[in-house]
């Protein structure tokens, strides 16, 4: 018997039951258009739901507390990470989290500001050192906690905070019920040769000169394959043509200096991968930056630099007998350490600049300062913070 709907339907309209039935077409993967292509890499970062769909999530009536996850989809298993964050948020009694993906053109600072505008109570970040730096820049001074979920190969800030690098669930849980550690944030004002100016944050360390050239010369494909070890290749490429350059520099409240250097670093943290201690006395909560000036004299000078970093700082200082040896040794000027709330650096010719391992072009002036306690880090309960 025909229904009333059958009489109302136009004669050329498809039958609903027939249209809903599955067809006999077997579709190959290449028959289905992808929802994302390489051409989209330069697009805007997007907010996604727990399934990874780009549609905005409706927030009306959503109760607090709530979290936001900012992640680099090339560094993590996005589906698994979103599910884990969502499950642990529900377990902690929090509302459904917000999810944001980064892109090449937005490393995470813009979407983090979007998340903060949603009045989130904590932001989780999962990505490489560049993503952590960008998100930290947007979080600085916000009063909202940041939880670092170690991802990628470097994890420099997580290493310096001695966070668990292979336990993502531990850091996700810390976002909901962990303790809070205030840490300093460094800022660098950069002036280019054409007068253009920019200001960016760094949470580990930045520099001008050979260290930045080394990063610029590192093969990106090799870095993806072997991680931080790729910097050895970049160092070899850079050292072959490295030449000292003249700088004028002045620490806050100190007199002006002129020197020929290979590199000047300004550090908030001091540890590097492979157990290297570049600045063994650096602290993320002392309200100061540690300044390292490299000025080796010839090839033998680099031997002294390597001895200072790889042997003295990273080995001898760990033992009482070693510290006694260091106290008796004649000082050399291949590496000079200092400390202050900031440093101004000027050069006559532009030189490369890096912040937290990312290149930031060339500059003729770099003016740095520290913002004490500006970033609140979520850490696991009872995490050892002595010496940080």
Image: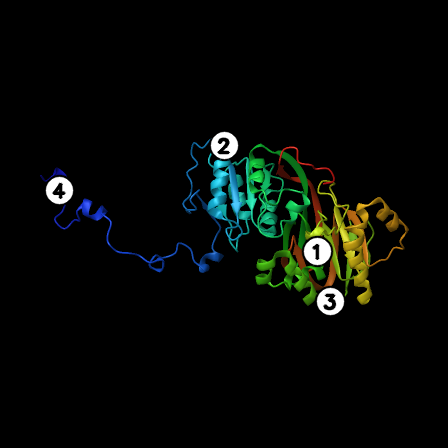
Circle 2 residues within 10 Å: few <14, some 14–19, many ≥20: few
Disc 2 designates what residue?
91
Residue to which mark 4 is pinned: 6
Disc 4 from disc 1: Cα separation: 75 Å
Which dot, 4 or 2, sits closer to the camera? 2
Report which quarter residue 293 is drawn in. Answer: bottom right
Residue lying at the far bottom in this picture: please name it: 241
Assign a secondary structure to mark 3: loop
Question: Between disc 3 and disc 2, whose residue precedes?
Answer: 2
Please tell me the numbered disc located at residue 207: 1
Inter-mark Cα distance, 1 to 3? 15 Å
Tell which circle, 1 or 3, labels the residue nearer the N-terminal end.
1
Q: To which residue does mark 3 refer?
A: 242
Q: Position of residue 63 (x, y in %)?
A: 47, 30
Distance CA(mark 3)–CA(mark 4): 83 Å
Residue 224 visible? The answer is: yes
Pinpoint residue 84: horizontal percent, then vertical percent: 49, 40
Q: Earlier in the sequence, mark 4 or mark 1?
A: 4
Residue depicted at 79% across the width and 54% down the height: 311
* N-term-proximal mark, 4 vs 2: 4
> Closer to the camera: disc 1 or disc 2?
2
Residue sticking out furthest to the left: 1
Q: In percent of the image, x 67 and y 49: which residue is there?
A: 204
């Amino acid at each position: 018997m025909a229904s009333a709907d059958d009489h109302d339907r136009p004669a050329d309209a498809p039958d609903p039951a027939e249209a809903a039935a599955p067809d006999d077409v077997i579709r190959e993967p290449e028959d289905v258009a992808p929802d994302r292509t390489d051409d989209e890499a330069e697009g805007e970062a997007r907010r996604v739901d727990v399934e990874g769909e780009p549609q905005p999530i409706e927030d009306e009536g959503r109760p607090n507390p709530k979290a936001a996850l900012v992640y680099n989809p090339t560094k993590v298993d996005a589906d698994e990470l979103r599910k884990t964050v969502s499950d642990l948020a529900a377990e902690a009694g929090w509302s459904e989290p917000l999810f944001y993906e980064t892109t090449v053109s937005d490393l995470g600072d813009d979407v983090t500001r979007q998340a903060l505008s949603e009045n989130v109570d904590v932001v989780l970040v999962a990505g490489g050192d560049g993503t952590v730096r960008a998100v930290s820049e947007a979080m600085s001074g916000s009063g909202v906690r940041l939880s670092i979920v170690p991802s990628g190969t470097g994890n420099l800030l997580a290493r310096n905070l001695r966070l668990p690098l292979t336990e993502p669930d531990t850091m996700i849980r810390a976002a909901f019920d962990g303790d809070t550690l205030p840490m300093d944030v460094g800022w660098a004002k950069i002036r280019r040769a054409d007068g253009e100016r920019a200001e960016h944050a760094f949470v580990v360390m930045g520099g001008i000169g050979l260290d930045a050239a080394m990063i610029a010369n590192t093969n990106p494909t090799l870095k993806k394959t072997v991680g931080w070890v790729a910097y050895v290749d970049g160092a070899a490429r850079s050292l072959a043509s490295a030449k000292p350059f003249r700088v004028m520099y002045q620490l806050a409240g100190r007199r002006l200096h002129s020197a020929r250097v290979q590199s000047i670093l300004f550090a908030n943290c001091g540890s590097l991968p492979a157990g290297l201690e570049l600045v063994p006395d650096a602290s993320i909560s002392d309200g100061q930056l540690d300044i390292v000036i490299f000025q080796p004299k010839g090839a033998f000078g680099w031997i002294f630099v390597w001895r200072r970093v790889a042997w003295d700082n990273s080995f001898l200082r760990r033992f009482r007998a070693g510290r006694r040896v260091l106290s008796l040794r004649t000082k050399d000027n291949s590496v000079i350490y200092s400390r202050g709330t900031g440093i101004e650096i000027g050069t006559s010719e532009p030189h490369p600049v890096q912040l937290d391992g990312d290149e930031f072009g060339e500059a003729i002036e770099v003016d740095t300062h520290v913002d004490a306690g500006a970033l609140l880090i979520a850490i696991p309960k009872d995490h050892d913070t002595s010496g940080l």
